[in-house]
Amino acid sequence: MSQAVVLPAPVPLRIPVREILPYAIFASVLLLLVLYFVGAEQGALSVFSGTYVHELVHDGRHLLGFPCH
């Protein structure tokens, strides 16, 4: 004869917003920095002279739909 085993229901993990907020801010700043370099670098607001950054992120511009030609 087999007996049924009742397992306890899993308790959801609670993560306070206070612990997530610094990581969310850091990720947002990093994302905006990457978006700047892919979308706006080598334009009117360029930080670096030359075409090095433009050529480095050239395919990423096309993938994200930014015009560059």
Image (tube, helix red, strand yellow):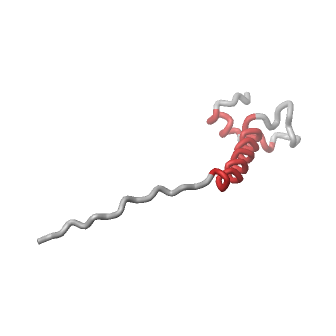
- The x, y position of residue 22, in whole percent, is 71, 53
Q: Residue at x 35, y 63 (%)?
A: 8
Nearest the camera: 52 or 33? 33
Nearest the camera: 47 or 12? 12
Q: Residue at x 82, y 40 (%)?
A: 51
Nearest the camera: 13 or 69? 13
Residue 56 image-quadrant placement:
top right
Outermost residue, bottom side: 1
- The x, y position of residue 53, in whole percent, is 78, 43
Depicted 30 relative to depicted 54: above or below: below
Depicted 10 relative to depicted 40: above or below: below
Numbered marks: total: 0
Is 32 left, or right, of 1 in this rendering? right
Q: Residue at x 37, y 59 (%)?
A: 9
Residue 35 image-quadrant placement:
top right
Quarter of the rendering occupied by the C terminus? top right
Outermost residue, left side: 1
Depicted 50 relative to depicted 13: above or below: above
- The x, y position of residue 13, in whole percent, is 51, 57
Quarter of the rendering occupied by the N terminus? bottom left
Nearest the camera: 27 or 48? 27
- The x, y position of residue 34, in whole percent, is 73, 44
